[in-house]
């Protein structure tokens, strides 16, 4: 029987700084979510800063890379640079000398080749659409992180200037 683990924790962090999204290089609003907070004789709806599951998953995969490097586990060049594209294009397969699946009989070979090249793909899953698509579902799932309800009154929303991450090879071909 497969098990399921749910982890819940409380931490005091500056969520406004950690969840920079939207337009590039402009003043913009960050991710928010409405939460209902009970107050005395009714309820209040507050829009509070949140951390997306995607940003939390990215950080978790950064920790996987750190541990994989310490233990000598295989990592692709993209994962070493913390660019978790995970073989989502044929060019990424070519970078690691992996041939795309040409038919359904080669799906297992491609999956094994990818797992032997990148430990992060084993834990975090991947979707390789080149040739015949090959998919491995992630071993972990992450939802949004929201402030604790009793801290909801203290949450503040401020627009901030920030930059978006760009992959390291932005050269036009």
Image: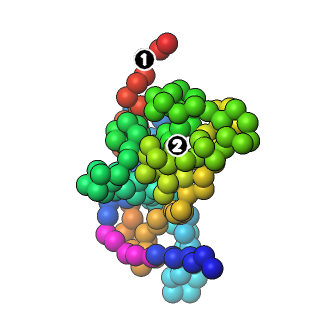
Secondary structure mostly taken by the magenta-highlighted segment of the chain = loop
In the image, farthest residue toward the right:
104
Q: Position of residue 52 (x, y in %)?
A: 49, 56
Magenta run includes residue 65: no
Please say if 134 is above or below 155. Answer: above
Residue at horizontal 37 percent and vertical 69 percent from the top = 154
| Residue 171, numbered circle | 1
Please say if 63 is above or below 129. Answer: below
Q: Secondary structure at mark 1?
A: loop
Q: Quadrant of residue 153?
A: bottom left
Rendering colour mode: rainbow
Q: Position of residue 110 (x, y in %)?
A: 59, 41
Q: Secondary structure at mark 2?
A: helix
Q: Position of residue 161 (x, y in %)?
A: 35, 39
Tell me if residue 30 can be seen. Answer: no
Using the image as rendered, state which of residue 136 and residue 171 is in the foreground: 136
In the image, the segment drawn in magenta is 8-12
145 displayed left or right of 99: left
Q: Quadrant of residue 49?
A: bottom left
129 displayed left or right of 33: right
**N-term-proximal mark, 1 vs 2:** 2
Please say if 112 is above or below 71. Answer: above
Return the residue at label 2.
113
Tell me if residue 45 can be seen. Answer: yes
As measured in the structure, the alpha-carbon distance from the residue carrying label 1 to the one carrying label 2 is 27 Å
- Mark 1 Cα shell of 10 Å, populated few (<14), some (14-19), many (≥20): few
Residue at horizontal 51 percent and vertical 43 percent from the top = 114
100 displayed left or right of 163: right
């Amino acid at each position: 029987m497969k098990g399921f683990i749910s982890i819940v924790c409380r931490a005091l962090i500056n969520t406004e700084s950690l969840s920079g999204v939207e337009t590039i290089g402009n003043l913009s609003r960050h991710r928010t979510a409405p939460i209902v907070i009970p107050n005395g004789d009714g309820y209040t709806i507050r829009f509070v800063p949140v951390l997306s599951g995607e940003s939390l998953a990215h950080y978790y995969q950064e920790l996987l890379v750190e541990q994989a490097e310490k233990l000598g586990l295989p990592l692709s060049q993209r994962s070493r640079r913390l660019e978790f594209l995970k073989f989502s294009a044929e060019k990424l397969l070519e970078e690691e000398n992996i041939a795309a699946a040409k038919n359904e009989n080669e799906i297992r070979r491609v999956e094994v080749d990818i797992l032997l090249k990148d430990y992060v793909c084993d834990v975090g899953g991947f979707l390789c659409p080149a040739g015949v698509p090959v998919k491995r579902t992630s071993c972990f799932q992450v939802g949004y992180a929201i402030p604790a309800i009793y801290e909801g009154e203290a949450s503040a929303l401020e627009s901030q200037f920030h930059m978006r991450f760009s992959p390291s090879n932005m050269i036009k071909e």
